[in-house]
Amino acid sequence: MVEALLFHGDGGERVAKRHRSATLLDLDILDCPICCEALTTPIFQCDNGHLACSSCCPKLRNKCPSCAFPVGHNRCRAVESILESTLVPCPNEMFGCTKTCFYGKESAHEKECIFSQCSCPSRDCDYIGSYKDLYAHYELTHSSNFSWGISCGITYTAVMFINDEIRIKRVHEKKLLFAVQCFWKPCGVCVTVSCIAPSAPEVGQFSYRLSYTKNGQTVIYESPEVKKVRKVSFETPQENFMLIPHNLLFRSGLLVIEFCIVDKLNQE
């Protein structure tokens, strides 16, 4: 434990206040004893002092599993105060991040941490690294799947079959990988674009435009933001996609899509 005297006030009215700090060696004691996830405010306790997080209380029907007393009405202010004063290192400390965050808030910081690790979009590859290292890895290891690079602000044509599900495009000047994906839906095929990177401000902000034409009929979709993901998902998206109806699809399953990635911070 470390103690220090902090002085407040001016002139002869200075008041000394004792400030103490300590090192918490076992962070598991700050986890919810029911779901074992990190406790976050609000924290509740029953009349016997058993803790429960705000997510567990409704699932328990506000009944303490240890003593059956009601839980979910009385806040545990003491533990909440401990959480609000407990700083922990970023989960990416081993990769170079020097920032700290309050306990239970690590996941929020990790989403925006430039050192967060990203997964290779190739299904048979388990490589994980920073978004820039991932760019170099994909170019070196999966060159057969690497068609060509693109630049922001220029319209390109992506040719793929629906069953291919994904095409990876690279923006060399940004050292970024963009995934163009297609998914079957009951009413047609949806196409979406994502950027494989953390949501860090240093990565930048992008929008995109898609268009698809068959027999003189054109479908156009413009998204104000490219979603950033650390791992590509192959689950059908529920929003932010272009829908191509069945009557505009070729029997071969071939898709010829024009797309453009726009750097929102460097638009001319």
Image (cartoon, rainbow, N blue to C red):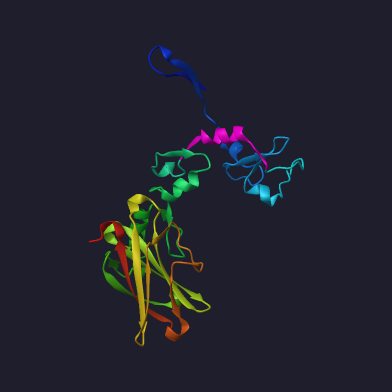
How many callouts does the rendering have?
A: 0
State the residue lying farthest toward the top.
Answer: 12
Picture quadrant of residue 268: bottom left
Would residue 42 be found to the left or right of residue 258 on screen?
right
The answer to whether residue 254 of the structure is visible from this angle is: yes
Picture quadrant of residue 121: bottom left
The answer to whether residue 26 of the structure is visible from this angle is: no
Q: Position of residue 82 (x, y in %)?
A: 56, 33
What residue appears at the point 28 percent right and 66 percent down from the top-left corner?
150
Q: Is residue 239 depicted above or below 243 in this figure?
A: above
Q: Position of residue 129 (x, y in %)?
A: 40, 53
Q: Position of residue 244 (x, y in %)?
A: 43, 78
Asked if the magenta segment contains residue 75, the reply would be yes
What residue appears at the point 60 percent right and 34 percent down from the top-left corner?
77
Q: Position of residue 218 (x, y in %)?
A: 36, 81
Question: Of 249 and 28, which appears nearest the observer?
Answer: 249
Asked if the magenta segment contains residue 179, the reply would be no
Question: Of 248 and 14, which appears nearest the observer?
Answer: 14
The span shown in magenta is 73-89
What residue appears at the point 42 percent right and 84 percent down from the top-left corner?
248
State the residue lying farthest toward the right.
Answer: 68
What residue appears at the point 76 percent right and 40 percent down from the top-left corner?
67
